Image (spheres, rainbow, N blue to C red):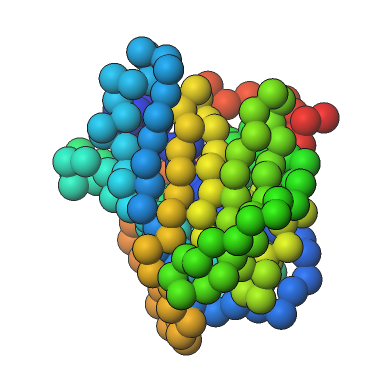
Amino acid sequence: MTRSLHKPFIFLFTFFASHVGFCQFEGVVAYDISYSSNDPNTRSYIDMLPKESTLYIRESEMRLDQYIVGGGSQSFITNLTANTSTLVMRLMGQKFQVKMTSEEMQQLEKIQKLKIIEGKLTKIIGGYTCQQAFAISGNDSLEIYYLPQLKTRCILPQFADLKGLPLEYEIVNDHIRMKYSCNNISQKIIENSVFEVDDEVLKIPFEQFAQSFGISKSTAIDGR
């Protein structure tokens, strides 16, 4: 079944669990997503990619929801305490879940930790004053604006050294530059049900899912 899915829908997991202890932010962050690419092969499907994402954070748990053109969706749920992640996808009338360990998630994402350099500018985002930073990726410099007083253990693995919650940031994946811009942030209590997955949703083993997308078990982690 997973062979009918298109890989670009999969690489848009944005947040993962970092093992950094912070005073926790609990609430919801909504982002607009924009894309740019100089590669004609990727420009052909940019219009199909999600334009919004919603992030729910509570202590060591997070859930990211994104909606795909045509009525599809993907939800990514992480529990740092349990060291597990679950991808829930709905596409072309099919719905399934894939449970993963942190090591399997890193195989999927091909994560490489980026060097963070503090910038000098600030920007008001969602009523908060955010600090500028840059993540260095090869010859590329990815701009970030983060909120120092709102910290979380659930953060972009590439930005593990960032000192707060990113409200505006860029990442590059598959020759596509993606910009996430916060349009709303709300500190609120998140119910348990947000992080739960219906047990009746079809379960796909990670090995089967990875094979469908050509993900090798020997993928290097953090650039090693």
- Residue 143 x/y as whole percent: 59, 44
Describe residue 182's horizontal placement relative to residue 160 as left or right: left
Is 57 situated above or below 69?
A: below
Along the line of sight, the residue nearer the viewer: 145 or 56: 145
Q: Residue at x 69, y 42 (%)?
A: 135
Towards the viewer: 70 or 207: 70
Q: Residue at x 29, y 50 (%)?
A: 67
Seen at 77% across and 41% down, the residue is 115
Q: Quadrant of residue 84?
A: bottom right
Tell me if I can see residue 110 in this picture: yes
Judged from this view, the residue extending furthest toward the front is 121
Quadrant where the image shows the C terminus: top right
Residue 192, percent across and down? 46, 80
Say which quadrant the N terminus sits in. Answer: top left
Q: Is residue 9 above or below residue 166?
A: above
Q: Position of residue 3 (x, y in %)?
A: 35, 26
| Identity of the residue furthest to the bottom in this view | 189
Residue 92 figure quarter? top left
